[in-house]
Amino acid sequence: PLHNDEDPDENKQEQEEKFDVSAPRPYDIVIYGATGFTGSIAAHEFTQRYATSNINFKWAIAGRNQQKLSTLRTSLVSDFNRQIDDLSKIVPLSNTPNYLHDANTVQLQQTKREYISTLPILIGDVNDDSALSTIIRSASLLICCIGPYRLYGDKVIALCAKYGTHYVDICGEPDFIERSAFKYYNLAQSTGALIVSACGFDSIPSDMGVLFIDQFYTANQSMCSSIDGYLTGSSPDGYQVHDTTLQAAVYGFNDADNLRKLRKQVEEEKGDSYRVSRQQILRVGPKQSVHKELYFWSEHVSKYSMLFPFADSAVVSNSQGLSAALLRRQGIHRKPFPQYAAYISFNSYWNVLQAVSIGGLGSFLVNYEFGRNLLLNYPSAMTFGVFSESGPSEKQRATQTFSFKFFAKGYSKALCKKTGYDVDKLNQLNPDYNLAASVSGKDIAYSGTCKILIECAIVLLQEKERINAGDVDKACPAVKGGVFTPSTVFANTSLIQRLNEAGITFQIEEYPENEKEDEENDDGDEYKEMPLSAPLLDGNGQEEEDDDIPGGFEVIQKPEEDDVNVKVNANPTDDDEDYDYNKFKNLDDDDVPQ
């Protein structure tokens, strides 16, 4: 273990000047904030992954309290031994199907058992610059579990950017995420540090879900225009959220004006900015209609719903802006990105009233210091038990499930080919190719979040070369350093596949089956442009009713129970032409619609 006295103040400057960001580090992964509520769960999730697969990282746990870290290590050792004992009795986990058949398994298990029995403990308070620097310099990647991040995370990201240490967190605070990029993107780029926020439930299901759907459209040589996401869930034993989430929300509402100012500052940046502003991200199709009512009845999920009050939409937009900027610098100027709106749905009208009451009371109280103090000091009483200082019980976490239901609208391969994939022409037409998809799992805020976080860390380390290289032909940017949100970094990786294997399931649930038939019946007539406001016509030139139009705006029906879990092959057939984004390489930024 590293100790604070290994980095004396008198040698600090000299050590920093000599530090080589490309040199090997003592640890592949350090979990910082490991004794917190979520940090402890993350450490146990990593231990399970470590025990049940062939990964053999050198790793450590870190925080400010030696005694708590020692207690945690004892628990992790016990957890590891239990996992190994179970593996000798049962079939291995789905994400490690060949683990027990490896000839070196016994030796590897013994090596890991010896390592975890003396698992390194690193001590460093976030306010102790010397100790924190020592921890960050010792790690190839830091898993950061200290929140609220706006209070404790800035210095951590600054040092990771400085020392070239890769970083993942579970931050769902848009102001912190976007401000970190504004302050440290160039520094992280210079050292090659890949700093990725929002690698938990905030906001992998939305951010990677939108990417998943967009890539499905692209693989089928079509274009996605817009996506509506609805969070649904079930908590048969109730579910209390830990009050750190409430703290982040309180501070976030209080800083809303600062976030608006920051976004305006980004928009006004001249030259080669690290991010395309929200208004300049290229879209295709009609402007998305967003429900801004206090609440509404959604026909998609047959539940009362309202706008999702957390970071998802902001994170998706941030990722798209970062990806667009990278792609433009790499020669792709006209890659359109789907519009996205996120909603939360409720299982009963009582739940709606509860949410409206808590939201209304909270939005009033955050405007005043006394109100913020009430929310922060009495979380359970002020939120009717939704938040608590203890978080959910083991039983509540074991029985809670979630699903993000996505409903996408886009343009079919046939229509795209007829328009030559011309965004301006497609903008005059109604989308004709709709589908439904989902991302689902268990224990939305903690075990589920930590599974996601751990897979993000492992993928970043194991597939860094793929991330650095990108795949411009598939509109996956080359990412060689900077401050990001997930889909920009993980677009060209196996993250979605790994999450599926870990129990966070991404799938296409419903898609048009008549497109191929439509192509075969195409009579080759000259394509006729039609203004968006014009009525759609049937083959005889007669107006059709909206609900009779295959693939029209509102034709997505609730999937039948038996059809929900149908898996879809998203790969085009061998004789199909790939959608070539390189055709846009010679276009200038001035040609991009604002």
Image (cartoon, grey):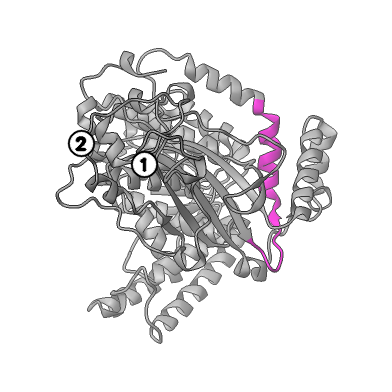
Q: Secondary structure at mark 2?
A: loop
In magenta stretch: residue 238: yes
Is residue 413 visible from the viewing direction of this image?
yes
In magenta stretch: residue 93: no
Q: Residue at x 60, y 69 (%)?
A: 398
Q: Nearer the viewer, mark 1 or mark 2?
A: 2
Is residue 10 visible from the viewing direction of this image?
no
- Percent x, y for residue 143? 47, 50
Q: Earlier in the sequence, mark 1 or mark 2?
A: 1
Residue that numbered label 2 is attached to: 524
Which amino acid type corresponds to the residue marked 2 in the rendered image? Answer: Gly
Residue that numbered label 1 is attached to: 489
Which stretch appears magenta?
A: 234-256
**Dot 2: few (<14), some (14–19), or many (≥20) neighbours within 10 Å?**
few
In the rendered image, the vertical position of residue 287 relative to residue 25, given as above or below? above
Question: Which of 376/280 is in front?
Answer: 280
Q: Quadrant of residue 522?
A: top left
Relative horizontal placement of residue 186, taking residue 20 as reference (left or right): right
Question: Which of 297/491 is in front?
Answer: 297
Q: Residue at x 40, y 67 (%)?
A: 50
Q: Marks 1 and 2, Cα distance to the nearest angstrom?
A: 41 Å
Q: Quadrant of residue 147?
A: top right
Which amino acid type corresponds to the residue marked 1 in the rendered image? Answer: Val
- Percent x, y for residue 435? 43, 49
